[in-house]
Image (cartoon, grey):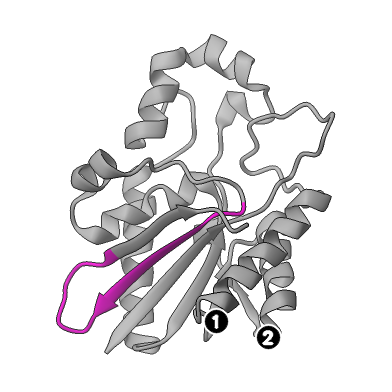
Amino acid sequence: MTTRLLIARHGNTFGPGDIVTRVGITDLPLVESGLMQGQRIGAYISKHNLTPDVIYSSQLKRAIQTAEQAQKTMHTQLPIKKLAIFNEIDYGPDENQPEEKVIARIGEQALKNWETSAAVPAGWNVDPTEIINHWKHFARQITEDHAGKIILVVTSNGIARFAPYLTGNFDHFTSKHSIKISTGAICLLEKSMSSEAWNCLDWNIKPD
């Protein structure tokens, strides 16, 4: 028996002409292109016979709306279970700041370390151990409560980048994949009953 975990990053929260900033706890809705990304997530899931049995999302508008849009093209009406553990991280002094100001404060190397190995820059209100433990606890829960099912989680990039710890070897994972996930992209992990770790089948897939 195999349990599958789909992880989707929410769609765009900025449109053409907007000043793009680093958004964490700020509760922005999706823009038009983000709504369409949500629909494309649902279309991709349906096309690949991955229609979920259960849907979870963060408590933020952008994740909930992405899940709602995905359901439109999946033709499902599942309840969306909203969990705080999937909310985006708090960027502290860099919240709502454009990227050039973020880099000016923390430096390019600190940002690179975040993007490649999830090393948290100074000043951000992030506890990696807590996020990793949340993923591990959630993974145990779904394998107990939804064994053999497909589970969709719609979350943010700051949270999703820690999901590869479920594979049991984060360093090996990051040697093969970028942990940064594009808006509207999908990742797929699976776990058999006989295995302790999750196997990553797809990572950062961008639906057409």
Q: Rate crowding at label 2 as few (under 14), some (14 to 19) or many (20 or more) other CA atoms within 10 Å.
A: some
Counting labels gives 2
Labels 1 and 2 touching (C-beta < 8 A): yes
Is 5 left, or right, of 82 in this rendering? left
Image position of 74 with respect to 96: above or below: below
Is 71 inside the magenta-drawn segment? no
Residue at 82% over, 30% down: 18
Quadrant of the rendered image containing residue 201: bottom left
Image position of 42 with respect to 92: above or below: below
Quadrant of the rendered image containing residue 70: bottom right
Q: Secondary structure at mark 2?
A: loop
- Which corner quadrant holds the C terminus? bottom right
Q: Which residue is mark 2?
A: 76
Is 196 left, or right, of 43 in this rendering? left
Q: Rate crowding at label 1 as few (under 14), some (14 to 19) or many (20 or more) other CA atoms within 10 Å.
A: many
Image position of 137 with respect to 159: above or below: below
Amino acid beneath label 1: Thr
**Residue 21: percent from left, percent from top:** 69, 29
Q: Secondary structure at mark 1?
A: loop
Image position of 47 with respect to 88: above or below: below
**Residue 58: percent from left, percent from top:** 59, 61
User: How far apart, in angstroms, are the residues tagged by discs 1 and 2?
Assistant: 8 Å
Residue at 66% over, 68% down: 67
Residue at 60% over, 25% down: 94
Q: Is residue 119 visible?
A: no
Is 191 inside the magenta-drawn segment? yes
The front one of 200 and 117 is 200
Q: Which residues are magenta?
A: 184-199
Quadrant of the rendered image containing residue 75: bottom right
Amino acid beneath label 2: Thr
Q: Which residue is mark 1?
A: 51
The label on residue 187 is none
